[in-house]
């Protein structure tokens, strides 16, 4: 159940999609002089080295950030977070979503992160030590149920499960429905893989029935290596902030041009 290790996949095409939308949304929220809460249910280690053996073994970063970065404007919040991470940690450093959030938030904002894997949690604690993150080594959806509605009530939740347990596709709509009932003003973002098996489709049908006004955005890309089953990346966003649909459309064009 805890076998998934994201450092093999950091910076891949799905990460670029997810992190570009997340960075844009956080930038939008922090333009207003009101505090916010950020909650992440499956945080990982928060910082990755794309020059290490794991990244080279899969080659996924080369197909993702290596291929797509220059297609995204240098002034985009995602690019700015990349620049800040590299300036502090080196040219091959890549920020996970917890670090993107930490670099985006302000002194009055709240940062809540859950990571169940003991090794990843220890690395997360080390990497996020300079920031005011509140970390928990527990199931992320359990943390979200406990925290919601958070204070401040304004804010965003990101769920980025590994989907290594197939029952997650069945349980996620229930988790999101419960969280939304408690936190009806929260922006809820769910990343999901687009798999050749189509196993994700029933989950999306269920989510769409619960949240008919949500934003569902998907990008497609070639398999990063022979036999890879992921053919694209999706984000399902409840209460999408103003302008996110247009930002998603720009990403669609970038991925289509790189196909």
Image (spheres, rainbow, N blue to C red):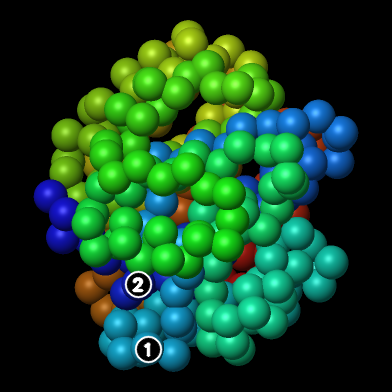
Residue at mark 1 to residue at mark 2: CA–CA distance: 9 Å
CB atoms of marks 1 and 2 within 8 Å: yes
Taking depth in this image into account, of 21 and 143 the one nearest to the observer is 143
Q: Where does the C terminus fall, quadrant-wise?
A: bottom right
Residue at the (75%, 59%) spot, across then down: 77
Residue at the (36%, 30%) spot, across then down: 143
Residue 15, can we see it? no
Q: Secondary structure at mark 1?
A: loop
Q: Residues within 10 Å of mark 2 (few under 14, many from 20)?
A: many
Q: Secondary structure at mark 2?
A: helix
**Which quadrant of the view contains residue 82?**
bottom right
Residue 146 lies, in percent from the top left, at 38, 21
Residue at the (60%, 22%) spot, across then down: 151
Residue 243 lies, in percent from the top left, at 80, 37
Name the outermost residue toward the left. 1
**Left or right of residue 215: residue 46:** left
Label 2 sits on residue: 7
Q: Residues within 10 Å of mark 1 (few under 14, many from 20)?
A: few
Q: Is residue 62 above or below residue 143?
A: below
**Left or right of residue 58: residue 125:** right
Label 1 sits on residue: 52
Residue 139 lies, in percent from the top left, at 27, 37
**Which quadrant of the view contains residue 242?**
top right
Total count of labels: 2
Residue 169 lies, in percent from the top left, at 26, 34
Residue 255, can we see it? yes
Name the outermost residue toward the top. 181
Sooner in the amino-acid sequence: mark 1 or mark 2: 2
């Amino acid at each position: 159940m805890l076998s998934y290790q994201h450092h093999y996949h950091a910076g891949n095409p799905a990460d670029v999609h997810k992190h570009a939308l997340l960075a844009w949304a956080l930038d939008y929220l922090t333009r207003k002089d009101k505090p916010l809460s950020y909650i992440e249910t499956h945080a990982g280690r928060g910082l990755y080295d794309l020059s290490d053996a794991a990244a080279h073994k899969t080659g996924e970063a080369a197909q993702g950030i290596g291929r797509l970065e220059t297609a995204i404007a240098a002034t985009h919040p995602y690019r700015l977070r990349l620049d800040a991470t590299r300036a502090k940690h080196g040219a091959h450093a890549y920020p996970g979503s917890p670090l993107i959030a930490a670099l985006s938030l302000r002194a009055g904002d709240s940062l809540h992160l859950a990571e169940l894997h003991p090794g990843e949690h220890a690395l997360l604690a080390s990497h996020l030590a300079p920031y005011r993150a509140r970390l928990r080594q527990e199931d992320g959806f359990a943390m979200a149920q406990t925290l919601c509605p958070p204070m401040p009530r304004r804010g965003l939740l990101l769920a980025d499960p590994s989907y290594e347990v197939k029952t997650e596709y069945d349980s996620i709509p229930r988790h999101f429905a419960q969280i939304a009932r408690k936190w009806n003003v929260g922006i809820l973002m769910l990343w999901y893989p687009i798999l050749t098996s189509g196993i994700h489709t029933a989950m999306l049908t269920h989510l769409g029935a619960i949240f008919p006004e949500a934003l569902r955005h998907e990008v497609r890309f070639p398999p990063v290596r022979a036999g890879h089953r992921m053919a694209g990346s999706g984000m399902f966003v409840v209460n999408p902030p103003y302008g996110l649909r247009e930002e998603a459309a720009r990403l669609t064009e970038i991925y289509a041009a790189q196909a």
